Amino acid sequence: MPITKVSVVTPIHNESSNIPELVERIEKTMEAWRAAGSGREWEHLACDDHSSDGSLELLKKFAETHPRLRPVKNPKRSGQTGGFETGFRHASGDVIVTMDADLQNQPEDIPILLKPIDDGKLDLVNSIRTRRQHASSLIAISKLGNVLIRQLMVCPVSDAASNFTALKSSFTKDLSLVENDHRYVIPIFVHRGMDPNRIGEEKTRHEARKHGASKYSAIRKALTGFPELLRCKKRIKQGFYDWKK
């Protein structure tokens, strides 16, 4: 069945310098996507994680002139994972697109991820970041992390932590996330019944951050990544992410 509504979910923490461009580029891209097919709708859920730089206030101001922008605030400070969970809970689309707010992933590439789902071929499309604009140390740790995820979980993608993903929203219903679960949502969805054969990848562009500071640390990721992965695997085994009865 063709997509009827897309919910674009962007976790936000101290991204006031990127918000104007982010909002405008998502709107331009999604309005063009909407115009290309009859009956299509979309919304942009900007999920603020208790920013201290006025990001939420700026989002609310933009929402006055951008009716499809919906600023929401995480109930508590919970990082990118909290932004995902908040977005999943508030999304009204039958397809959700998750993407960072730092504009390293390009909003103009959203339709690339949507097409295989719109064509009925896939339930989830993950991005493969081409020519990544990250420090070599972070890229190396990320590659190792992807190898470990594929070894320990069912995760049929090569860039699990890209965070630029389109998926059918039915798999996110009543889903609770903790720690840095945003890195492991694909194996979590597989555990919830998503067919690995209906998961695919598409190449997308990756640009250097123009404004603001990166939230990622190679050393921190190296020290915390493997224990987090093991804890997530344990939660899957214990049924933490199971469907609510």
Image: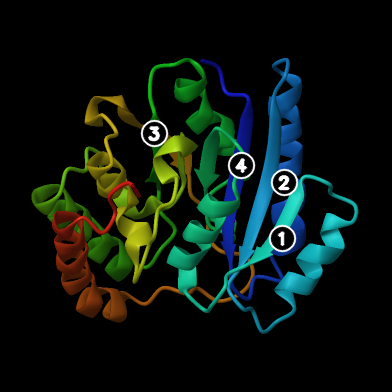
Q: Which disc, if any, is residue 124? A: 3
Q: Residue at x 48, y 15 (%)?
A: 119
3D distance between C-alphas at marks 3 and 4: 14 Å
3D distance between C-alphas at marks 2 and 1: 16 Å
3D distance between C-alphas at marks 1 and 4: 12 Å
Q: Amino acid at mark 1?
A: Pro
Q: Secondary structure at mark 3?
A: strand
Circle 2 or circle 3, nearest the eye: 3
Q: Position of residue 93 (x, y in %)?
A: 60, 36
**Sequence order check: which comes first, mark 2 or mark 1?**
2
Q: Which disc, if any, is residue 25? A: 2
Q: Picture quarter containing residue 40?
A: top right
Q: Secondary structure at mark 4?
A: strand
Q: Which disc, if any, is residue 7? A: 4
Q: Secondary structure at mark 1?
A: strand
Q: Amino acid at mark 2?
A: Arg
**Sequence order check: which comes first, mark 1 or mark 4?**
4
Q: Position of residue 244 (x, y in %)?
A: 35, 49
Front-most of 68 and 30? 68
3D distance between C-alphas at marks 2 and 3: 23 Å
Residue furthest to the left in view is: 151
**Sequence order check: which comes first, mark 2 or mark 3?**
2
Front-most of 61 and 74? 74
